[in-house]
Amino acid sequence: MTHLFRAGALAAAVALLALPALAPPASAHIPTPTPTAAVKPTLIARASLVSLSGDPWRPSGSLEVSVINRGKAAAKGFFVLRLPPGLDVTSGGDCRGARSPRTWICGGTEVPAGGRREYPLTLRSTAAKPVFGVQKWGSVAGRDAAGDTESPTDFRINWPDRTSLRLRATASPVNDGSMGVTARVQNTGTFAIGGYSLNVVTPKGVQVIWPLCSDSGRMAGVGCEILRSNVLKAGATETVHIRLAVIGGGKIIRVYLAPTNRYTNKDTSVTLHVPGGGGGGAPTTPPSATPSATPTPSATSSPSASSSPTTPAGDGAELPRTGPAGTTYALFGAALLALGPACYCCAAASAVAEPTGP
C-alpha cells in the first residue's frame, strides 16, 4: 500500500513540473502586438504630363510640380525629382543634384498650412540622336526640412511623334551673283508640330546668305540648317524664302527636311539646278576701260626730234582747193612742213613775190 502511494505521489510531482512548459501562469499575461498605423507624410508632390517639342534634335518641355502641405503649420517644402536617362533639368525649381544618379532635390520655399506651391521647370532631351514616338517616366516625391520623404509619384514624358511633312521648292534665275529659292513646307500630318529643320546642301561656290543658316557640324561642312521653331498646325503650309550667293555655273542645290527619321512620307527632299538668267553662271568680265593701242606712225611720217609737233604728213593733200592758186598753196604748205621753221621766212617771201595772174 505504501508502495502504491509513493508511486502516485511521484507521478503527480512529474505532472506538476511539466505544467509551466505547456502554458504560462494566469497572472503572467503577454500583450498581443497590433500593427502601427503608417504616419501620413505632411508634404506631398505631384507633377504634370510633359510633352517635348521644338528643336527636333534637342526637344524641350515644361514640367509643373506642385508641393502640397497637408499639415497644420507652415513648413518648408521640398521635392525629390528623378528623371530617366537622356533627359535633364535646364531651368526652374531651384534644383541641385543629389547623391543618387539622375536625381535632384528641388524647392525649399515655405508652404502655408493646407496650401501649395507651384514650381515650373524645363526639361530637355540630351539623347545623342533624335528620338521620336517614345514615352518615358519620371517621378517626384515630397520632402520636409528634416528629410522625411513620401513615396514617389510617377509622371509621363512624351517625345515628339513621327509625322508627315511635305516639301516643295523652286529656284529663281541668278542675278548679280545671287539667286533665290522658295521652299513650301506643308504639314500633312494629323497634329501640330513644334519645329523642324530645313537643310540646304550647297556645293563649292554657293552659300546661303539669308535667313540664318547654322553650321551645327551634322552636315560635314557641305551645307547648313535653317531651324524653324514655330508651331505648324495640321494642314497648314509655311513658305520659307532663301537667298544664296552663287559663283560659277553648273551647280546643283539640294533642300530637304530633317531629321530624316522623323517623317513617314518620301516627298521631303528637292534637288534644284542653278538656272540661267541675267548674271547667271560665271560672272561676265566687263570691257576694259583702257583704249586700244594706236598704230605707231612710220619712221617717214614721224617728225624729227628737233621739230615741233605738227599735223601728221598727208593732211596737206586735204586742204581746200578753191581757185587757181589752190594747188600752189597746197604744195607750198607741204614744202613748209618739209623744210621746217628755219626756211619759213624765205618761203613766205617767195610766195609774196609770185604773181597771181596770167
Image (cartoon, rainbow, N blue to C red):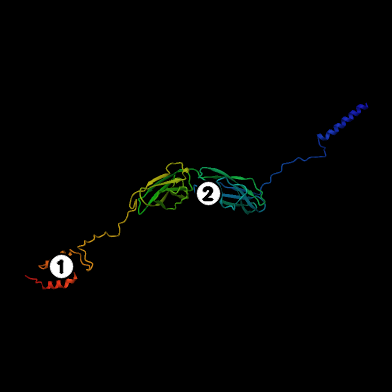
Quick check: 332 above or below 188? below
Q: Is residue 39 left or right of residue 273?
A: right
Left or right for 66, reference 36: left
User: What's the residue at 18%, 71% (across, down)?
Assistant: 342
Which quadrant of the rendered structure holds the C terminus?
Answer: bottom left
Residue 184 in sight in this render: yes
Crowding at dot 1, Cα within 10 Å, few <14 / some 14-19 / many 20+, comes out as: some
- At label 2, the amino acid type is Ser
Q: Residue at x 93, y 27 (%)?
A: 2
Disc 2 versus disc 1: nearer the observer: 1
Q: Quadrant of residue 188?
A: top left
Residue 14 spot, x, y in % from top left: 86, 31
Please name the residue that numbered disc 1 is placed on.
335
Separation of marks 2 and 1 at Cα, in angstroms? 101 Å
Nearer the observer, 330 or 135: 330
Q: Position of residue 98 (x, y in %)?
A: 62, 49
> Going from the N terminus, do you reach mark 2 or mark 1 first?
2
Q: Measured from the top left, where is residue 143 in percent x and y?
A: 64, 49
Horizontal arrangement in the rendering, residue 14 relative to residue 181 (left or right): right
The numbered dot on residue 60 is 2
**Looking at numbered disc 1 in the image, what kind of residue is underneath it?**
Ala
Residue at horizontal 89 percent and vertical 29 percent from the top: 8
Q: Nearer the viewer, residue 307 or 310?
A: 307
